[in-house]
């Protein structure tokens, strides 16, 4: 889960433009969000202090900058756990290292994914002065956010996040909203999106579906979450074909995306960027390997760096079978990323697609989703279908018309914002009691046709 580049997308401009999500505190976080499987990764490093030591810190920056010479902009990404727990001096040192190791003219974008609860004015001034792009994790208005995003005592965190976000806004820091879609907010796409846009002023939004897969054996433990409050919780692995109660439903996720899209496409194209929609438009324009990795044909260019220098195939595969090596053990990060096992990891995304996906009409946009969630079976019984398939299919088919219009506008050198006019011509002819275009069964005037109702943050 990364702020990656500006659109929430891993940069894929060349073979060396791999993306590293570094975890300077490992899995350690000051919060205890119930769905955060990453909290359980502390079990990989028993006895560790969970702070990236100076030599690994230096190797990380030096190797990344050396590997990405010739890339337009190097993204130095920090996430967690909670990276702000490292304190400001760690990030001041990061900037020193970048100055030391950058090639002349090499452009660097520093990004951080944070829960925002530890941000104060000193942080705000620092982040602004050094042009950090900050991703803030927020799951919607208070009740939706607090459903699963709680602290170590199980207390809600909404007010603390808003306070941290206010710090960023006061200092003019560039920020993105990163919102997980789960069972608690999955039925409220429109309300949630309006809250992010209108109450918070978000202009870049990344949504991530929560899919926690588990085996039957582990399900009872997993239901109470992955944080430290859940005493005996297991190490999360990509195993099993059951899901926890926090997991978003497949059809629910499709409806969520449609709910947001119907609002965004009418009013916000060009003003608000939603990474899922940007990625879809790129696919409708015939581009393939751009945008969110989960919908690319192949992957393997976004690796995860643990606090001790261990490099893993992906942020979602920080587990022993996917360890590529340690960046301080003789092979550089670039060499580890180029290992045959990592190339095979990325290629498997394409090679393991079930026939059902290969013949699917929206495969060009979906590409079967992330392999980590391919644990259901196709209608004819082939294993390896994505858990969210029903939602993906519903969403991609639903947006085909407007996506074609936008893609055509862009191809003709015009602006995709022309889609707003396309909608307004059609909406002008709609009567208030006609079914809403989002197909949820409500009348138009009480659904996407109703504007200006503020989402309630309190
Ligand atoms: S495994 Fe999934 S999340 Fe990881 S790089 Fe591949 S598509 Fe992306
Ligand atoms: S929508 Fe379903 S069948 Fe089609 S490519 Fe995606 S996962 Fe496969």
Image (cartoon, rainbow, N blue to C red):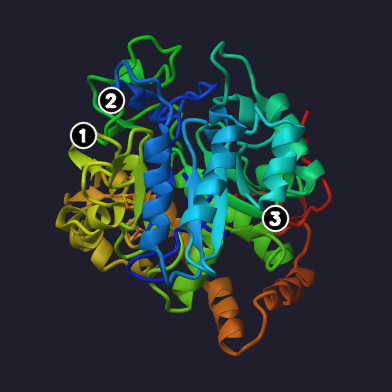
- In this picture, residue 414 sits left or right of residue 65: right
Q: Quadrant location of the C terminus?
A: top right
Frontmost of labels 3 and 1 is 1
Examine the rendering and report whether any part of residue 256 can be seen.
no
> Could you tell which of marks 3 and 2 lies nearer the N-terminus?
2
Frontmost of labels 3 and 2 is 2
Task: Please name the residue shown 62% across and 88% down the image.
Answer: 413
Name the residue tied to disc 1: 320
- Element at label 2: helix
> Could you tell which of marks 2 and 1 lies nearer the N-terminus?
2
Real-space CA distance between mark 3 and mark 2, rounded to the nearest whole angstrom: 37 Å
Q: Give the crowd class for mark 2: few <14, some 14-19, many >=20 residues within 10 Å.
A: some
Task: Please name the residue shown 59% across and 79% down the image.
Answer: 405
- In this picture, residue 384 sits left or right of residue 299: left
Task: Please name the residue shown 37% across and 39% down the image.
Answer: 56
> Could you tell which of marks 3 and 1 lies nearer the N-terminus?
3
The image shows residue 402, relative to residue 75, as above or below, that is below
Q: Position of residue 166 (x, y in %)?
A: 77, 37
Name the residue tied to disc 3: 203
- Residue nearest the viewer, comparing 99 with 415: 99
The image shows residue 164, relative to residue 103, as above or below, that is above
Asked which quadrant contains residue 184, the reply is top right
Q: Position of residue 131 (x, y in %)?
A: 66, 53
Real-space CA distance between mark 3 and mark 1, rounded to the nearest whole angstrom: 38 Å
- Element at label 1: helix
Q: Give the crowd class for mark 3: few <14, some 14-19, many >=20 residues within 10 Å.
A: some
Name the residue tied to disc 2: 44
Examine the rendering and report whether any part of residue 160 can be seen.
yes
Contact between marks 2 and 1 (CB within 8 A): the answer is yes
- Residue nearest the viewer, comparing 355 with 193: 193
């Amino acid at each position: 889960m990364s702020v990656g580049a500006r659109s929430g997308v891993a940069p894929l401009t060349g073979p060396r433009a791999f993306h590293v999500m570094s975890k300077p505190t490992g899995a350690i976080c000051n919060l205890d969000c119930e769905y955060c499987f990453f909290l359980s990764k502390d079990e990989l490093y028993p006895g560790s202090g969970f702070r990236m030591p100076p030599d690994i810190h230096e190797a990380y920056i030096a190797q990344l900058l050396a590997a990405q010479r010739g890339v337009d902009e190097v993204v130095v990404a920090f996430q967690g756990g909670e990276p702000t727990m490292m304190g400001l001096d760690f990030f001041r040192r990061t900037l020193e290292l970048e100055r030391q190791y950058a090639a002349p003219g090499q452009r660097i974008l520093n990004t951080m994914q944070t829960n925002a609860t530890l941000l104060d004015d000193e942080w705000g001034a620092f982040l602004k002065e050094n042009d950090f792009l900050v991703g803030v994790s927020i799951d919607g208005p208070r009740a939706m956010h607090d459903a699963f995003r709680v602290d170590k005592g199980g207390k809600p965190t909404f007010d603390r996040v808003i306070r941290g976000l206010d710090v960023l806004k006061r200092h003019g820091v560039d920020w993105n909203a990163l919102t997980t879609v789960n069972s608690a907010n999955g039925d409220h796409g429109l309300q949630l999106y309006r809250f992010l846009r209108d109450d918070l002023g978000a202009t870049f939004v990344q949504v991530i579906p929560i899919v926690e897969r588990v085996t039957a054996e582990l399900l009872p433990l997993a239901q109470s979450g992955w944080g430290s409050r859940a005493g005996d919780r297991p190490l999360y692995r990509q195993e099993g074909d059951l899901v926890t109660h926090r997991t978003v439903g497949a059809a629910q996720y499709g409806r969520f995306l449609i709910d947001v899209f119907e609002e965004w496409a009418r009013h916000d194209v060009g003003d608000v960027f939603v990474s899922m929609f940007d990625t879809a438009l790129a696919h409708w324009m015939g581009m393939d390997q751009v945008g969110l990795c989960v919908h690319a044909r192949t992957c393997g260019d976004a690796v995860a760096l643990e606090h001790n220098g261990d490099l893993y195939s992906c942020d979602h595969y920080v587990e022993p079978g996917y360890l590529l090596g340690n960046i301080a053990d003789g092979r550089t990060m670039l060499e580890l990323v180029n290992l045959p096992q990592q190339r095979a990891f990325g290629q498997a995304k394409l090679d393991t697609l079930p026939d059902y996906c290969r013949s699917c009409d929206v495969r060009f946009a979906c590409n079967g989703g992330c392999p980590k969630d391919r644990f259901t079976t196709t209608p004819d019984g082939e294993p390896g279908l994505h858990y969210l398939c029903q939602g993906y299919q519903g969403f991609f088919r639903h947006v085909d018309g407007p996506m074609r219009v936008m893609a055509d506008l862009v191809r003709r050198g015009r602006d995709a914002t022309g889609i707003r006019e396309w909608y307004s011509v059609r909406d002008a002819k709609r009567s208030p009691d006609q079914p809403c275009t989002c197909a949820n069964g409500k009348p138009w005037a009480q659904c996407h046709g109703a504007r200006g109702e503020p989402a309630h943050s309190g």
